[in-house]
Amino acid sequence: MAKFRNSKVVDLPFSQATSAQGEEQNQVLDRPIGQILREKVRLSPEQVEAVLAHMRNTGLRFGDAAVALGLASHDDVLQALSEQFGYPLATEDGRNISPELVTLNQPFSSQAEAFRAIRSQVLMRVFNDETQKRALAVVSPASGDGKTFFCANFAVSLAQTGARTLLIDADLRGPRQHEVFGLNNSTGLSSLLAGRVDSQVVQQVVGIPSLYVIPVGTTPPNPLELIDRPAFSILMRELVLKFDYVIVDTPAVVYGADAHVIAARCGAVMIVARKDSSRVAKLQELVQTLSQSPARMAGVIMNEF
């Protein structure tokens, strides 16, 4: 990874660590759910025998039989399944920490399913070209359209496939990703672009082994000037080589040209607008402007949530 000071590129300490961790964490543990559940809820040998007997008598699976006997909860079974298949899932205790993360807190809801459907489309339209790796910038016409909500949940859905995913909060005017994921925001993208970072800026999200976030850090007085620097372009070129997918949250277009510049540097862009709120004329103008930029247009999402 690169750090920029006086136009020189210096290695950042997280470059080797993320690669090694990703290979280890993407391995799916080949263990039966019965063994995982037995360890998770600490079933005694007698309780295991009771579950097995109930399985034989009813034809239920181990998890369902344990729930029927009151020896495990539905949440215990979901957690065991998530561990068996390497699918990150929020624990029951943690589901009220970040309610916006529906893909993590409510993985079987209609909202989470909508993100999975969008994921499939984006993988085919944006991330299917190995000869030209791109990051995806997510932009919106105005504040409150749900852009940050979309970025956070979309990044989680990508990480749930086991792919090493990086979410960059490039909204240097009103950052929120550190709040959504509960991250330290003392340092981040702004410090990196200003050449003042001496420690790791990429933070791994607890409970989602394949998801990493670069928060904004200190909100700068000159956001557009920072994004316009060559350092940002160099950084993006290196990051797309280090991670499978890179998603970039941007400031709303109403605040200035930041989003247009970021989209051009990323190579691909998606627009998020709010249903029954975003002005059609402004949305059409944004689509037309971005269509003339170097970034590939991935589509327009109408946010109903």
Image (cartoon, rainbow, N blue to C red):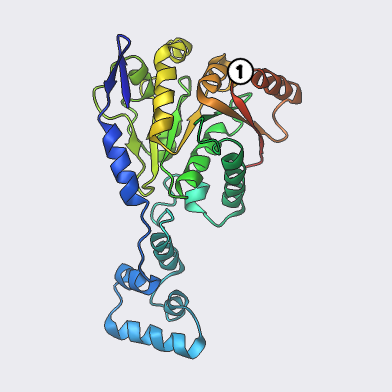
Furthest-right residue in this view: 281
Q: Position of residue 89 (x, y in %)?
A: 43, 55
As displayed, is residue 47 above or below residue 258?
A: below
Name the residue rendered at 28%, 33% in the picture.
14
Query: Mark 1 is on which residue type?
Result: Val
Q: Is residue 45 left or right of residue 175?
A: left
Residue at position x 59%, y 39% in the image: 122
Q: Give the quadrant of residue 1.
A: top left
Is 119 in front, or is 267? Answer: 267
* 146 or 239: nearer the viewer: 239
Instruction: Quadrant for residue 256, please give it.
Output: top right
- Which image quadrant: the C terminus? top right
Label 1: how many residues lie within 10 Å, few (<14), some (14-19) or many (20+)? few
**Horizontal side of residue 247 vs 45, given as left or right:** right
Could you say which is closer to the camera, residue 236 or residue 117?
236
Query: Callout 1: helix, strand or loop?
Result: helix
Residue at 38%, 71% in the rendered image: 32
Quarter of the image where one finds residue 118: top right
Coordinates of residue 116 in the picture (x, y in percent): 57, 49
Please say if 207 is above or below 195.
Answer: below
Residue 12 can be seen in this image: yes
Residue 79, horizontal then vertical, whole percent: 41, 62
Whole-percent x, y for residue 177 in the image: 44, 33
Which residue lies at the image location 32% right of the left edge and 67% below the top edge?
40
Is 138 on the left-hand or right-hand side of 3? right
User: Does 111 sit above or below residue 276?
Assistant: below
* Residue extending furthest toward the front: 131
Residue 220 seen by the camera: no
Residue under pointer 1? 254
